[in-house]
Image: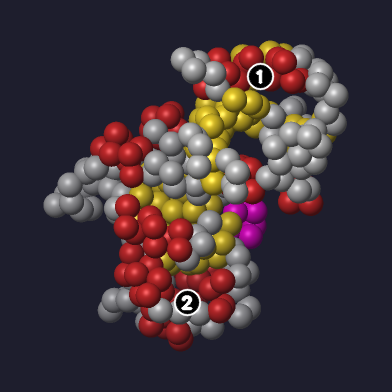
Amino acid sequence: MSAVTQVAVAVIVNENDEICISLRQKDAHQGGLWEFPGGKIEPGETVEAALKREIKEELDLDIEASRPLIRISHDYADKSVCLQVHKVLSYKGMASGLEGQQVRWLPLAKLSGYNFPEANKAIIKALSLPDKYCITGQFHDDRDFSEKLTAALVSGIRLVQLRLKQDDSTDIVRAEKIIKLAADISTQYDARLMLNLPQCFLEQVDLTTVPLNGFHLDSRNLKNFASGSMPTSMRSGLLSASCHDRDELELAIKLKADFVVLSPVQKTASHPELPAMGWKNFARLIEGISIPVYALGGVSEHDLETAWHHGAQGVSAIRAFWK
């Protein structure tokens, strides 16, 4: 296999929330498929400079600002690529296919109906996920739970992990009640709900009538299901997992997780005994992991810029979002 080709890729969104895609020429690598525009990064060139040059040459658009979205490594039969994907924050001009290619602007929901190169598919997954992931924390009663979840959703949270532990205050009946309450409130705000339950709850709680978007695996369930079999009911919808090292990240990939959280990035008040990995180690651990990764542990919305520039989808938190 030849050296990895570094490619700068732009996700350009217009004022109508439509995303720009273009059709690859028939004689090009992966020809005849739709793609997010971009091109090869020249030696000594930054991703930002490559994006500006390629998008001007391909679409006659002037990129003014962008930020990292995801980095994707992929091996084709004849070529290895690393897509360094940026989300364009502002641009000038009207898109035109200067190389004779078809150009279309589509809402996110319609992208799945188009054929993309395999390496591009993770971009759609990253685009479909928000940059903040709330994990539920402690609550006193149903009213307190409802108020805290509603406050998080009102603040803009659109992805929630309902995290229930098996303890003296949470039996099966109570767990079912809280799950239904979380689902009802999340539906009202068009937010996606992920369930993180101990295995005994997964086996006993009736989820057949609850509108869920997927399941989150803690590190124990991640290891159990990776070495055994995961219930069929958990394979519908999204799947995410908690990871703390490279081995657990690889297990999540093996289970075809849609996204993961990696922790602890920084020291936390809840687990002060755990050493923080720091942002540099976070970036090193997710190198080559081509699914969205949220940074968890001592982070908040104020860390979003830092998270993006170290390869994260965004930030995940309990204390920062559950108030």
- Asked if disc 2 and disc 1 are in contact, CB closer than 8 Å, the reply is no
- The image shows residue 33 at horizontal and vertical percentages of 76, 42
Residue that sits furthest to the bottom in the current view: 204
Please state the extent of the stretch shown in magenta in the rendering: 184-191
* Label 1 sits on residue: 54
In this view, the residue in front, 272 or 277, is: 277
Asked if residue 62 can be seen in this view, the reply is yes
Residue 308 position (above or below residue 277): above
Where is residue 58? Give x, y as percent: 74, 20
Report which residue position mark 2 lands on.
230
Residue 322: image x %, image y %?
A: 40, 50
Position of 101 with respect to 112 (left or right) is right
Is residue 46 positioned above or below 319 on the image? above
Q: Which SS type dominates the magenta stretch?
A: helix
Residue 190 colored magenta? yes
Q: Is residue 271 left or right of residue 176?
A: left
Q: Amino acid at mark 1?
A: Glu
Quadrant of the image occupied by residue 286 = top left
Residue 197 figure quarter: bottom left
Camera-nearest residue between 318 and 293: 293
Q: Residue at x 64, y 48 (%)?
A: 118
Residue at position x 61%, y 80% in the image: 208
